[in-house]
Image (cartoon, rainbow, N blue to C red):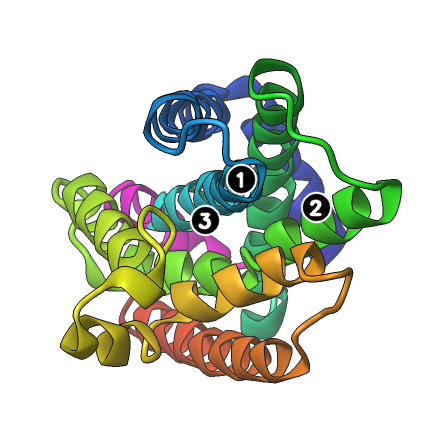
Amino acid sequence: MNTTYLRMEIVRLVRNKRVVIFSMLMPALLLLIIGGVSVGDDSDAKQYVMVSMALFGAMTAALTSGSTIAVERGLGWNRTLRLTPLSPGGYVVNKVIVALLVAIPPVIFTFIVGAVGLHVRLTATEWLLCFIGAWLSALPFAALGVVIGYLAKPDGVQQVTALLNLTLAAFGGLWVPVEVMPHFMQQIARLTPSFWTGEVARSPLDHGHVDGQAILVLGGWTVALALVALRRFRVDTARA
């Protein structure tokens, strides 16, 4: 049942390309504006902005993909799932896997725009590590999207997702480096998962090193949000 449901979700993803297209165009446009205009010829700054925008695209795709659950709930899909052998854990895992698949195109497209449009140059190892970091950093947001899908109402889930996405991106240092923020904003930033995802995704730019502390914190966020998502699924199906 888990495999069948995952296959069905992937087919739905292929047919509905709006999430993927939006999550590709928005970070690419911001990259050209911020990286091409604001930072000038600073190559290090362009690298920073490119990886941050790739992460923003992955985060947007993962959040939006998971939050579609609210629409499914409005259509009574959760009642149908209750009649199937699909386990709560399998449901959450499948949603996270689909969100990770959706997060791949924005990262690749943003990197292409950075390399071609802004002439960003990295070693093969740095490209690979930055891709893996930006892509897998979408994990906690995939789980967060599931949580939003079970807490928000169908007619308001898009607004909630967009507001939360922009807030996390702003406070997490994806648009403006945390180091130049006021002190109180720096303290808030460290409490957000987006800050740590940025640390993971951009750490390969620092001589190819990966931030171990950031990976641990990010893993903690992922597990905590996944447990909340699992709990919300069980509560929701019990009411169905």
Looking at the image, tell me whether mark 2 or mark 1 is earlier in sequence order.
1
Counting from the top left corner in percent of width and height, residue 56 is at 43, 44
Q: Name which residue lies at 39% across and 33% down.
A: 39
Q: Residue 59's mark?
A: 3
Report helix, strand or loop for mark 3: helix
Report helix, strand or loop for mark 2: helix
Looking at the image, tell me whether mark 3 or mark 1 is earlier in sequence order.
1
Q: Name which residue lies at 76% across and 42% down.
A: 127
- Where, by quadrant of the figure, is residue 79 drawn? bottom left
Would you say the magenta stretch is mainly helix, strand or loop? Answer: helix
Q: Which amino acid does label 3 sit on?
A: Met
Q: Are there few (<14), some (14-19), or many (20+) residues within 10 Å of tag 3?
A: many
Q: Mark 1 — residue?
A: 54
In reply to whether residue 72 is colored magenta, the answer given is yes
- Residue reaching furthest to the front: 41
Q: Mark 2 — residue?
A: 131
Q: Is residue 230 left or right of residue 162?
A: right
In this rendering, the label closer to the viewer, 3 or 2: 2
Which residue range is magenta in the image?
70-84
Q: Which of 15 and 78 is in front in this view?
A: 15
Disc 2 to disc 1: CB gap under 8 Å: yes
Image height of 230 relative to 142, above or below: below
Tell me the CA gap for discs 2 and 1: 8 Å
Q: Which amino acid does label 2 sit on?
A: Phe
Q: Can residue 82 be seen in this view?
A: no
